[in-house]
Amino acid sequence: MSIRSSTTRSMSVIALVTCVLLQAGCIDDVAEGDLVTWHEHIEPILKGRCVGCHQPGSIGPFDLSSYEQAHKLRHAIAAEVSSRRMPPWGAGKEVAYSGDMSLSDEQVALVEKWAAQGAPRGDGSRQGPALANVNSAPPRADVTLKMPVAYTPKKTPDDYRCFILDWPLDKTSFVSGFIARPGNTKLVHHVAVFLLNPGDLISPATLKALAQLDADDPGAGYTCYGGPTGTSGIMVPIQQLGQWVPGSAGDIFSAGTGIRVVAGAKVVLQLHYNLSSAASQSDQTEVDFQVESEVAHEASFAPWLKASWAVQPDTMKIPAGQNPVIHQYREDPRGFFKTMSGGMDLSEGFDVHSVLLHMHQLGVRGEAVIHRGDGSTVPLLVVPRYDFNWQRVYWLAKPVRFHPGDELSVTCRWDNSAANQPVIDGKQAKPTDVVWGEGTGDEMCVANLYVS
């Protein structure tokens, strides 16, 4: 399995600007004729937003912790910031989010100016203020799950691998925070964790299919791509417990909320390994969960999609050569969410705390919107330039209430023209008709909401 060649080529610059992005405050006051310097303006940005990935031993393909390295890459840094490819923050400005990593127009202009001025070093005694941390890691690790054995990725440039793990607690508990700890930071590009609770509607058949995939696939784990069901033929999304991408410190779920995990539950750990900037090496990633014995409000990551897309995949057809192709689904989600969350009662409405948008490699834009009973709309997430390789959970600055009488829509847009085809197993794909599915050449359209 593979990703777009353009993505693998830009990962180096991508990560590099993951840094240069986020300097709010100290860099906005530079007058037009002033000199922009490394020490006073740029170093705080790179240290606060880039060096976490761009340092020896991490997934970033080059080191940005020194002036000398950043100076050499000044034009690439400016180009990535100007194009908004960095930092990897896809959400638009229609909604306010916590942990927003995006750069303001003034900040982008400042980075451009530094590069245009020759990237001056400046006076080392005039250090700019450190950036505020936009990520918050859970303060406790109450449960730790680890891959059962080390795994060495085999597919290049991308290997997607799933591992089935046992939940260790012997009584019902609630997950209130999550963070991944990659065993090999050079290779791990994303981590997703999925939950199968005993007694949930889809769990028995799904778990049986996943166990068979694991048994049939040589070595530890099994190959998976769009979700943990791999190519099993089960196309129903499974509830998530967390999602991690490089540069993220993890997630602390909204205060007083948590996801119910029952004794005997199974957890599926999905790893995306990227070998575009490092040779294959072994990895044994672990994930930490903050857990509560009880919470004020039970919550769930609830996937929103049109069920017929998964049951009859050709009802979400994306014809070969066409751009754009748009599919939308709008309905009251409460009944579907109740099923997908294991029976959580949402009859009186619910609060939306976060949204993740999921498509595959042909996806270019997507959004999730609440349609009020009075005809007004409330956007939850708009991703104007979707990138499969930088999916993330976007946490709303303030929860949004869904009331009885409202509806929820998810809208996805794809480009299936020849110019937008992915590279699969080293070969440039040709446009073909695409439908819903888990495979590399298939597509999906899901808005995954954290609701309570």
Image (tube, rainbow, N blue to C red):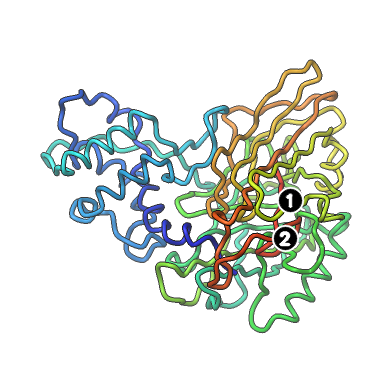
Residue positioned 57% across, 61% down in the render? 422
List x then y, in percent, for residue 25.
32, 28
Q: Nearer the viewer, residue 452 or 39?
A: 39
The residue pinned by badge 2 equals 169
Pointer 2 with pointer 1, Cβ within 8 A: yes
Left or right: where 282 falls relative to 450: left
Q: Is residue 32 visible?
A: yes
Q: What is the tally of numbered marks visible in this picture?
A: 2
Residue positioned 71% across, 46% down in the render? 446
Q: Give the structural element (helix, strand or loop) at label 2.
A: loop
Furthest toward the top, the residue is 374
Q: Quadrant of the C terminus?
A: top right
Answer above or below: position of 183 versus 142.
below
Where residue 161 sits, quadrant-wise, is bottom right
Answer above or below: position of 60 versus 253.
below
Which mark, by number, is residue 173? 1
Left or right: where 331 falls relative to 74: right
Where residue 214 sits, quadrant-wise, is bottom right
Residue positioned 55% across, 75% down in the render? 155
Q: Quadrant of the N terminus?
A: bottom right
Q: Nearer the viewer, residue 171 or 422?
A: 422
List x then y, in percent, for residue 230.
72, 67
List x then y, in percent, for residue 171.
78, 56
Where residue 395 sits, quadrant-wise, is top right
Q: Amino acid at mark 1?
A: Ser
The residues bearing labels 2 and 1 have C-alpha atoms spaced at a distance of 8 Å
Answer above or below: position of 67 versus 152.
above
Left or right: where 109 falls relative to 223: left
Left or right: where 170 falls relative to 364: right
List x then y, in percent, for residue 442.
70, 60
Q: Residues within 10 Å of mark 1 (few under 14, many from 20)?
A: some
